[in-house]
Image: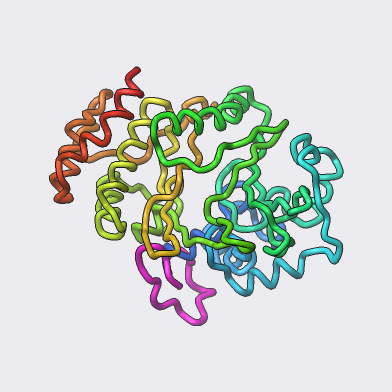
Amino acid sequence: MTGCGRTISTVPSQPASYPLFDLAAFPAGFTPTGHGREELLSQLGMSPKATQHGDWPLLLHGAGNPISHLRIKEATDWLQSQSRSIVESFSHEDIAQGNEWFLDTIARHGLMVTGSSGVQGQWPKLLMTLGRNGRFYLDHQLPDAHAAQHYLIKFQRGNHAQLGRIFDAEAPYMQLAHHLGLRVYQPITRLGHALFIPRFDRNTHGASFVRHAQESLAAFCNRAGFEIRLSHDVALAAIHCYCSDPIIEATEYLCRDMANVVLGTKDNHARSTAFTRDGNGNVMLTPLFDFAPMYLQPDGVARTMHWTVGERTPLIDWIGITNDVASQLGMDPSLIEHCETPRQHLLQ
């Protein structure tokens, strides 16, 4: 298997007795996490709180249709075996209103709401495809020849007012990121109780779709497990080592973290950033995602990634950080200039 920056070389031929996350970081990105992990473990007759002993079953059942361009054959076969012979479709309104028929249909597929398999995160999500007929289908059920666009559809989590405010703000926050000059994809559309988020790991190419390689920052740095703590310095070292244009990508990374700090998107763990490889072999950061005011989280969210130099006081020394990054990675100090415009926008 090939990731964005490295190749995963050897995995034991009979690894069921090994913890998955002790084998390789890259395959771990195929499996669902959060809400989806708990739902699928329950469906497999396991404890929804199962830890490492649940990883291998999750890979064999939950990696049949993940984000990115790779699949696990056994998981794909299992996913297709769960599909009904009648392929059902939905309107925008069915999904946006979360009507009973839509929810019942999804539940019959065992996907409420694991996400058409392979989706990560705490908020309920589904991978769905908009057909050329204007109807939505579970992503794995519609052939590419009939597909118009692929979406990640995100639903509100719980009834807490603060969670509602986070959900309401996600689309406007992405518009703000675009205004700041950050790398964003197509606009997020809010309809009723759902966010329709266009996927950037698939693009149209003539009459077909191209699936792009993608992996999380954790996998990019070859770190396994969900409790890992990375520093931004480790991330920047990986960018310098693997990205095709490290100055552009390091600049984008720095500007994103400025925005994270000022706008309260505190959930900056190693799976809220990802990398992609395009058709020409260029490795770069994906467009921004999961950009929302997580400081509103009712039970609190701590900033998990920090800078070794410059983040020792409540006021982060961005000039010091950018100088330090340029020095450590052998980059031109003009890197600082690229960050100046978004920094001024944020200060305003």
Residue 58: quadrant of the picture:
bottom right
Magenta stretch: includes residue 2: yes
In the rendered image, the vertical position of residue 338 relative to residue 89, given as above or below: above
Whether residue 338 sits left or right of residue 179 in the image: it is: left
- At 40% from the left edge and 64% from the top edge, which residue is drawn? 280
The answer to whether any part of residue 39 appears in the image is: no
Whether residue 142 sits left or right of residue 315 in the image: it is: right
Whether residue 321 sits left or right of residue 162 in the image: it is: left
Whether residue 277 sits left or right of residue 36 in the image: it is: left
Depth check, front residue: 176 or 37:
176
Main SS of the magenta part reads loop
**Position in image of residue 303 (x %, y %):** 38, 35
**Position in image of residue 244 (x %, y %):** 30, 58
Region of the chain picked out in magenta, as a range: 1-21
- At 63% from the left edge and 22% from the top edge, which residue is drawn? 161
- At 42% from the left edge and 41% from the top edge, which residue is drawn? 183
In the rendered image, the vertical position of residue 288 relative to residue 164, given as above or below: below
Q: How many marks?
A: 0
Depth check, front residue: 247 or 24:
247
**Quadrant location of the N terminus?**
bottom left
